[in-house]
Image (cartoon, helix red, strand yellow):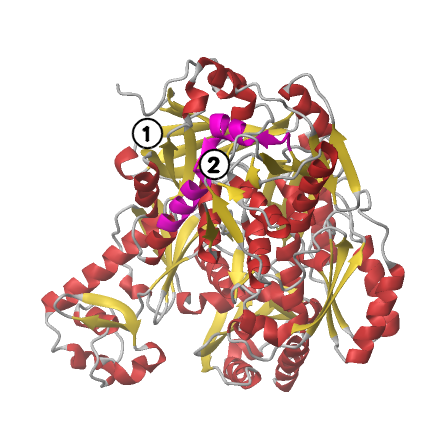
Amino acid sequence: MRRIGIDVGGTNTDAVLVEEGRVVHAVKYPTTADVTGGIVGALDLLARDAAVARGPIDAVVIGTTHFVNAVVQRRDLTKVAAVRIGLPTGASLPPFCDWPVDLARLVEGQIFMLEGGHDYDGREIMPFDEAGMRAAARQIRESGLRAVAISSVFSPLDASHEERARDLLRSECPEAAITLSRDLGRIGLLERENAALLNAALADLARRTIAGFRNAIAASGIAAPLYLTQNDGTVMSAGTAMALPVMSFASGATNSMRGAVFLSGVADAMVIDVGGTSTDVGELRRGFPREANSVVEIGEVRTLFRMPDLLSIGLGGGSIVRREPLRVGPESVGYRLTDEALVFGGSTLTATDAAVAAGIAAIGDQAKAAGVPLDLARAVLDRAREKIEDAIDRMKTAAGEVRLIAVGGGAFLVPDRLAGVAQVIRVAHGDCANAVGAAIAQISGETDQVYRDMRRDDAIAAAEAQARARAVAAGADPASLVTVDVEDMPLAYLPGNALRVRVRVAGDMRASARLL
Amino acid sequence: MAIPITADDIECLAVGAWILGTGGGGSPYLGLLNMRRLYAAGHRVELMSPLDLADNDRVAVVSNMGAPLVGQERLTDSRSIARAVQMQEDYSGGKFRAVMSVEIGGGNGIQPLMAAAHLGLPVVDADLMGRAYPEAQMTSAAVGDLQPYPCTLYDPRGIEAIVTQVPDWKWMERASRKICVEMGSIASTCKAPRSGREVKDWGIHFTVSKAIGIGRRVRAAQRAHADPVAAVLDEAQGKLLFRGKVVDVARRTTEGFLRGRCAIDGLDDDRGSRLELAFQNEWVVAWKNAAPIAMTPDLICVLDTVSGNAFGTETIRYGMRASVVALPAPPVFLSPKGLQHVGPRAFGYDLDFRSVFEAR
């Protein structure tokens, strides 16, 4: 398999070619406002390498923060019609009820609340209100809204009412972009509905952006299927990404950690990603990032997305050094590093300059750092080390020493000896770990359901079978599937020994998978 | 004299009630959302001292009963709890003077405010648990042998049920639980009405303002980047038991309860020690290095070391950084009769109650 991984970052678009388990070539190109220009540029640069040009490409995998940034920055969002099925329950908390006002103003189109939905035991709360849904569909058509989010109570257990609503809506508004909350999966109606609403709001942007990605790849003369990476470090087809752009929200940090696994060959370790402005510390378990607990806010909207548990601190290669008292960061020269740092002829003393003066990094014009006293340079690096040691300790989940994989352009700030760290692992191409993570991303399947009157082992086995079936349907090689996460939770006060089971499996992409 | 409850008070109440939930009672978040919307629509609620009740005043005692997980899907509708109160008024005759919660801990700390907003009644600054407990007989009213019936249960589909008579509180628990399960394992309930005299004699007083006070201190500490756990200890005269990281959680359901154990390995001053917690919906007993150091009815609260917010027994997970604190039990539960209802043996632990706060 020869796969190209692309990371569209705020400053650079990185592209790498990975072949038979190794990085063949890696490039960086400035990100452009339209995103596609940067991708075309990076692919052109990559293709100039003889080893890259040698054979066909099997897949292109893009990691992007474009969609989460649109929500955070409140731009390029579409107005949404919200359909909630579950009356008479939940009537006092309609869709959008816990959204920040500025975002609700941009996204809230119309709200329809209808009878229906299910109880935890599979009984209907009320029969689905077909007539009400037909009327809602007509109103949506007349209002001109083209993005619709449909949610129903307990749809992760029984999605039939959401599906029926979708079918009725399609017959009335064939061109509407419809999001079902059951595709975004977890129990917790408001959070699941919020994810569906955000997803619907991104429908237009996703269509345009992913079409742009396809054009960029075609313009570069590559005829290979396009995938996007999602929050859990696995991929979805471009078609799925168009329908479910919210699944890419946390892919940046995940790709960096998955890239670290690939480059180091280590599956259980902590990862430190030192950039220009900030440093992220996370933990790998069995090759995947440890995830944050429960509720995650995106642009101040509560969701249940599973995101890597990361600690971000204000330390990076561009961190500004202040004296008396000595401080390193959190202010940074950021992308202006190559203008403002001393080693690039600027006048701002940065962490990079201290590293060059101390002789641990060779960046820019080393003579220009000669004026930095060695004592000061060492004090700066000591301060950076203290910050890093504290961050690692805070992210540890067990006492004892850990292995630490250091990646990112500022990884030289991580010393070889750190308190609480048995070994610092450094890797080639660590500054392109995000793009590498995209290139090697796997395919996953997940399920989250309540089982009743089943033995725990049987319930977990049933959930595992369903998750595997979903992964295979998404293009995974069944032989390579590994269960990466199992969580079971008995439900208090429910009869029949109810057990909620969540299982996630992941495996390699099938060579024959063509999911465009 | 009743005083207004401000919108900020309600934000603080949600934080404080979750802490007083001692791991159970369900998150107050949905109740908080309902109250924000009611306040935005112009509703206001007042808080009255239990000492200002006349002996023959009638007080409605409310709670949302059922599985917190079902609540996350069916959500909490403020009108349902108001309807349960009206059913009680219709059945037992006579107007209510005020509303109060059966348990201040968790989501039920906010339920009386929702009923009060719709019914135009004040909320009594008291409850019958001073925390959260899993069963109907685990209240100060049951310790006082007050009448356990009638109890109304409401489902928004228009299902209304009344348990008109039972021989004792345990039968009330069994009968009402069956109805609740049929309603989808969630029901808005109005328990046996209490007289003003009963609330003055057997209510656990000033717990609403206590929860608001704790929440206010936590929120202030969060804003100031100060230590929120220290703020809780100071506000509620608590004791820090342990600081560490969660290393194991084992859960099982038996008889409809969430039971299990949680192990925390020490950090900082507690490095090298291990704390084990047993729970039945709420935290019940804590052992440090295998010796029991805290038990019900003392409140055992497990807080996020960084934010000061409570961790629930349903949501606590491996790797969380936790501070375990004890808060003093309501005195009514420290009598031999009180300990029969809510002491460690009521939860199946053969331990003689020893308070964290006893002079040693």
Q: Which residue is mark 1?
A: B273
Report whether residue B299 is seen: yes
B97 within the magenta span: no
Quadrant of the image occupied by residue A279 = bottom left
Q: Which mark is residue B172?
A: none
Q: Is residue A20 above or below residue B314?
A: below
Residue appearing at x 30%, y 31% in the figure:
B272
Q: Amino acid at mark 2?
A: Pro
Q: Is residue A75 left or right of residue A113?
A: left
Chain letter for mark 1: B
Element type where label 2 sits in the image: helix
In the image: residue A272, left or right of residue B348: left
The magenta segment is: B191-217
In the foreground, A433 or A206: A206
Q: Are marks 1 and 2 on the same chain?
A: yes
Please indicate whether residue A334 sits to the left or right of residue B314 in the image.
left
Vertical position of residue B93 compared to residue A264: above or below:
above
* Disc 1 from disc 2: Cα separation: 43 Å
Q: Which residue is mark 2?
A: B50
> What's the residue at 24%, 55% (across, down)?
A386
Which sits in the foreground, A417 or A375?
A375
Measured from the top left, where is residue A241 in percent x and y? 66, 68
Give the x, y percent position of residue A45.
50, 83
- Type of amino acid at the residue the image marks with label 1: Ser
Is residue B210 magenta-colored? yes
Asked if one can make out residue A186 in the rendered structure from this viewpoint, the answer is no
Callout 1 secondary element: loop
Position of the C terminus of chain B by quadrant: top left
Quarter of the N terminus of chain B within the rendering? top left
Q: Residues within 10 Å of mark 2 (few under 14, many from 20)?
A: many
Residue plotted at (41% across, 17% down): B353
Q: Position of residue A143 (x, y in %)?
A: 77, 79
